[in-house]
Amino acid sequence: MLPRYKKEAALRLKVAAGHLEGVRRMVDNDEYCVDLMKQLAAVQGTLEGVQKILLRNHLSSCVADAIKEGMGEQIIEELMGALKYDKSLIDGRGTLELDGVLAGETGAGEGDACCMPSDRLEAAETRAR
Ligand SMILES: [Cu+2]
């Protein structure tokens, strides 16, 4: 992953994990249902933010590289298949701008950014030949 996205995703996952543990304790303590629902929605919001970071990273590294190498069709198919698992990415509730925190990065010069496992990348390259 691109270093900034990796750092941001790791931080938000850590926050979500702590928050989720707090919600679990609230359940143990029989707290008010609506309070639980609000707290759980906040955790979900944080996780949706992580999904957006992952999507942005994938588009700016793996997808951009695959298109340059003439394998755009395959990687777009793969991504379209993955998007059905998180409707928050495509239902218009959020923005891919990530509240401006990470928008506008090109990722150029940030090292080995592709998040595709190397064995899969090799398989895709082999298929493309
Ligand atoms: Cu990727």
Image (cartoon, grey):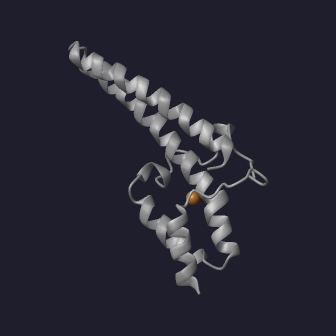
| Residue 42 seen from this side | no
Residue 53 in the image, given as x and y percentages of width and height: 57, 46
| Residue 78 seen from this side | yes
Who's the residue at 40% across and 60% down the image?
A: 84
Residue 51 in the image, given as x and y percentages of width and height: 50, 46
Ligand 1 positioned in quadrant: bottom right
Who's the residue at 75% across and 53% down the image?
A: 106
View extreme (right): residue: 109
| Quarter of the image where the C terminus is located | bottom right
Q: How many marks?
A: 0
Nearer to me, 14 or 38: 14
- Quadrant of residue 25 within the rendered picture: top left
Residue 98 in the image, given as x and y percentages of width and height: 61, 41
Who's the residue at 50% across and 64% down the image?
A: 79
In this view, 85 is above or below 93: below
Residue 72 in the image, given as x and y percentages of width and height: 60, 75
Nearer to me, 112 or 37: 112
Q: Is residue 15 left or right of residue 85?
A: right
Q: Is residue 62 left or right of residue 44?
A: right
Q: Is residue 26 left or right of residue 45?
A: left
Who's the residue at 43% across and 61% down the image?
A: 82
